[in-house]
Amino acid sequence: MKIILATNNKNKLREFREILAPKGYEVISQSEAGADIEADETGTTFEENAYIKAKAIYDMLHVPVIADDSGLEVDFLKGAPGVFSARYAEPGHRCERVLNELEGVPDAERTARFRCAICYIDAEGKSQYVSGSCEGRIGHERRGDNGFGYDPIFLYGDRTLAEMSADEKNAISHRGNAIKALCGIL
């Protein structure tokens, strides 16, 4: 089964492919499907933003589409960056902003989670949602060369997500958990 992923983010595309390809799904990006648009993420929740992105592609192509919206929620920062995770700072400076805002905060107060919401719109236009999360805490420095986004500062146990292999990360990550739930409705 071929599914369009409403993204041009190569890292998200890779993660979806790594998990869904072995289950028989061919995942193609929106640009590979000929949909070169950027939907404005104006929602106030991850679910709303996932729907906005999926609906924009579905309205163009009228084929099954999946879209995710995800982000980091830091308890000490009252849930920030949350739905603004991708826009929390200039590219390449997001981890540093979070680390600066947590400077001097003890480990016990650095709890955080990644959240992911996926919207699936089937061929008939019906929307369904699944979600996943991954609990951890924010470290004190960047560590690891794998992953992307906030992975180098997000600790799961004693390692950051950026220190894990793709298989290890996909087994416990917010997106991995949401994609597993998605398989239950596909």
Image (tube, helix red, strand yellow):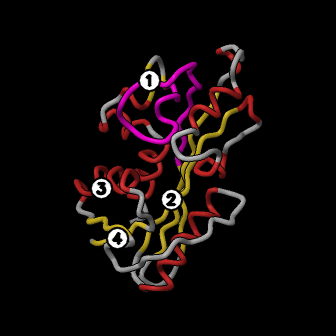
For label 1, the residue is: 143
Q: Quadrant of the N terminus?
A: bottom left
Give percent across and percent down for residue 31.
Answer: 36, 72
Q: Amino acid at mark 1?
A: Arg
Q: Is residue 91 magenta?
A: no
Q: What whole-number distance in Å separates the C-alpha atoms at marks 4 and 2?
A: 13 Å
Give above or below for 149 relative to 18: above
Q: CA distance from mark 3 to mark 4?
A: 10 Å
Q: Would you name the residue on which mark 2 appears?
A: 68
- Image marks 3 and 4: residues in contact by CB distance under 8 Å: no
**Residue 122 is drawn in which quadrant?**
bottom left
Q: Which dot marks residue 17?
A: 3
Instruction: Say if mark 2 contacts mark 1, CB within 8 Å.
Output: no
CA separation in Å, label 1 and label 4: 34 Å
Q: CB atoms at circles 4 and 2 under 8 Å apart? A: no
Magenta span of residues: 132-155
Amino acid carrying label 4: it is: Ile
Of pointers 2 and 3, the one earlier in the residue sequence = 3
